[in-house]
Amino acid sequence: MGDLRGRTFESRAGVTAFLAGVWLIAAPPVLHFSASQHAFRPYWWSMGLAVVVMLLGMVRAMAPLDVPLAQPVTIALALWLVIVALSAGDGGIWAVWLNQLVVSALIALSAGLALLINARR
């Protein structure tokens, strides 16, 4: 039963990471940044990392607990997203910047909780 609970929580954390990655990709157009190449430049790193978070979240959702390094890698990617958000002060929109910080914290929190619950088993 404990294994089922761990798998369920890990799977939910993976779905959360996947949806957060989708939102990170969709956020700049939804939050109305201009369509020029120059305006898109500050978000290249975050969108690339969001794709990796989405793929890793999909793996975690489909095969929870089968890839033991998925949780620490997801936490590291979320922290990297925070660093990218804090270092991108070159013309980014504050709403997108704040959104990236909040979503990165959500990804790190869900992966950290999944790691903590699976470590307690």
Image: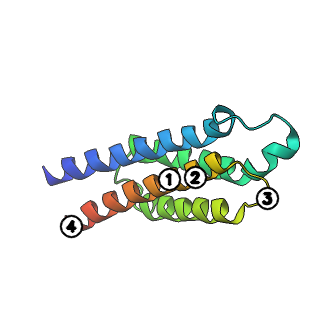
Residue 98 circle label:
2
Residue 90 circle label:
3
Give me the C-alpha separation between circle 3 and circle 1.
19 Å
Residue 94 circle label:
none
The quadrant of the picture occupied by the C terminus is: bottom left
Q: Earlier in the sequence, mark 2 or mark 3?
A: 3
Residue 78 location in percent, x, y? Answer: 53, 59
Give me the C-alpha separation between circle 2 and circle 1.
6 Å
Q: Earlier in the sequence, mark 2 or mark 4?
A: 2
Location of residue 58 with respect to 111 vertically, above or below: above
Residue 72 location in percent, x, y? Answer: 45, 65
Q: Which residue is mark 1?
A: 102
* Along the line of sight, the residue nearer the viewer: 93 or 121: 93
Residue 107 location in percent, x, y? Answer: 46, 53
Judged from the image, the secondary structure of the residue bearing numbered disc 3 is loop
Q: Earlier in the sequence, mark 3 or mark 1?
A: 3
* Along the line of sight, the residue nearer the viewer: 121 or 111: 111
Q: Which residue is mark 4?
A: 120
**Residues at discs 2 and 4 in contact (Cβ within 8 Å):** no
Location of residue 30 with respect to 11 vertically, above or below: above
Q: Is residue 110 left or right of residue 74?
A: left
Q: Amino acid at mark 2?
A: Leu
Give me the C-alpha separation between circle 4 and circle 3.
43 Å
Location of residue 111 with respect to 21 vertically, above or below: below
Q: Amino acid at mark 1?
A: Val
Judged from the image, the secondary structure of the residue bearing numbered disc 1 is helix
Residue found at x 40% / y 61%: 68
10 Å neighbourhood of mark 3: few (<14), some, or many (≥20)? few
Q: Amino acid at mark 4?
A: Arg
